[in-house]
Amino acid sequence: MLQRQVVRKILIGSIAAILSGCSSMGVDPWDRDLLAKPEMAINSSPLDQAVDDHIYFSKEASSGGRSFAGGGCGCN
Amino acid sequence: MQLINQSKTDQKIKPNKKYIAEKLALAATGLLGGSVYAQETEAEWDFSASILTYAETDRVSAAEIIIVGDKDYSDTSKFSFKVILDSLTGASANGAIEQNTPQTFTRPSGKDNFVTNANSTPLDDTFKDTRGQINLAWTDSLMEDTRYTIGTNLSKEFDYHSISFSGEIARDFNQKNSTLSAGLSFGSDQYNPHGKIPVAFSSMVIDEGQFASQNEFNTAFNATRGDSSDTITTAELLLGWTQIVNRRMLMQFNYGFADSSGYLTDPFKVLSVVDNNGITQDLVYENRPDSRTQYTVFGLVKYHLDESIFDISYRYLTDDWDIQSHTINTHWRFFINETNFLEPHYRFYQQSAAEFYQPFISQAGTIPNYASADYRVGDMTAYTIGVKYGFQMFGDRAEVRLEYYKQTPNEANQPVGIENLNGLELYPKVDAIIFQVNYFL
């Protein structure tokens, strides 16, 4: 019982730390010169990603994670 | 996944814009409290296209064309489409193990045979397929700092078609430095394999002169066939968090859940049934569980150095087929000048085998409930190494990418029922060259 309380306190403390950490992260809008570059977009190469998703879906047993895992082909 | 809207709009920012002007414009829009990207909104179509060739040594080769278009209809709404056409030819490992003698197999249609060489991985060269796919997506704002995307995906090939619908909501917090998103997707696929769906673990009927007539063969072959089609339904959940850390760095974390049910077996894969000497006595069609639940955790960090951009991502996947996989993917883009860059790429992948994976079935044992010798659900390690070069052509952006992919089965971790199977190679390897050209109008 005591252990469970300790785990709960650690969990709540961790979530609070992450949330407060997030609010202190980031930049002002006028400091986004580098982040505004197209190359800094999260998915800056959607064509490459479409190609890679198809290839690795066809050759390996894993898909998704970055985007939906869905199939769409009976790839051999 | 939640900065996608920004990323697509970002691509309209021409790379030769002056740094100071860009920074001033960003500052101005920031002071006005508007979106830092709203300035670029314009009602014009943007197109990009890609041509890909994929070639495995002595096996499958594929060619693919991708065309992507998007258009802003207001400051917040955007329509986009993606059309993919690909064609596949060549041979694929059919799951049977190699032997010291040539082997004869019946094609999936039952209308012909093919013979593979001694001491080589049996490859089925039946596959010639053309596929068309179209994706449509619409994005708009729902309320301040909140936007939604709805989309559909249609794919059609000779023996397989698929349709899916997806929806996603993303909300920005903390002056747009944090974004949380949640998405759902539902898909329905249908398999219509040529020659109908094989009965699980039924023996391949091979015409080696033992049938008195074609009708007699057809009767025997049809006895191994079930329905002409079957379906797969998939439901997915994807939760995302994107965080801008500082002026140079951002990161992304996703959690994904996918549940598939239906016909998850590959109708073209077989297993060899071998005796105690490793000699194939029979070939039976594989059978996989009719459901699969996958969980993924994905993390990405992207960092802008002075003259380059580095990103690295990691994905962990686990499922109820007992597959666990680790994927590390990294790019490092070096700017040569304002328009040209060089980007090396490395990807590492490792997966453990599905619990029903086995390279063959021992004749002395019993037939399991589920079994597959498909190398794609075996224990393997793979890597990709490549480079991309970006440049300008006719005033537009262009890229060429060359990659080498190598997949190696981890033989030490594979289940083998019979010791020393005459020294035969049980696990096929894959080597492939990928060449791609991208063009941005």
Image: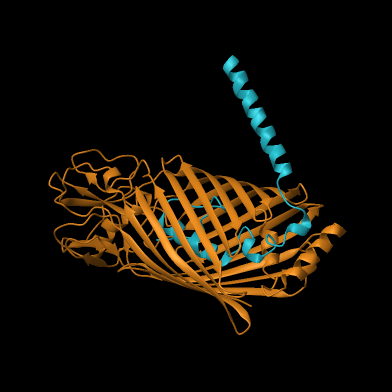
Where B441 falls versus A57 (above or below)? below
Tell me which corner region of the image, top left, top right, bottom left or bottom right, holds residue B353. Answer: top left
Could you tell me which residue is drawn at 18 percent across and 54 percent down?
B424
In the rendered image, residue B304, in percent from the top left (x then y), is placed at 61, 59
In the rendered image, residue B87, in percent from the top left (x then y), is placed at 44, 71
Q: Chain A is which colour?
A: cyan
Residue B422 falls left or right of residue A39: left
Say if residue B197 shows up in the picture. Answer: no
What coloring was used for the rendering?
by chain
Say if residue B260 shows up in the picture. Answer: yes
- Which quarter of the rendered picture does the C terminus of chain B lie within? bottom right
Could you tell me which residue is drawn at 47 percent across and 62 percent down?
B345
In the rendered image, residue B256, in percent from the top left (x then y), is placed at 57, 45
Where B3 falls versus B21 (above or below)? above
Nearer to the camera, A22 or A60: A22
Nearer to the camera, B191 or B387: B387
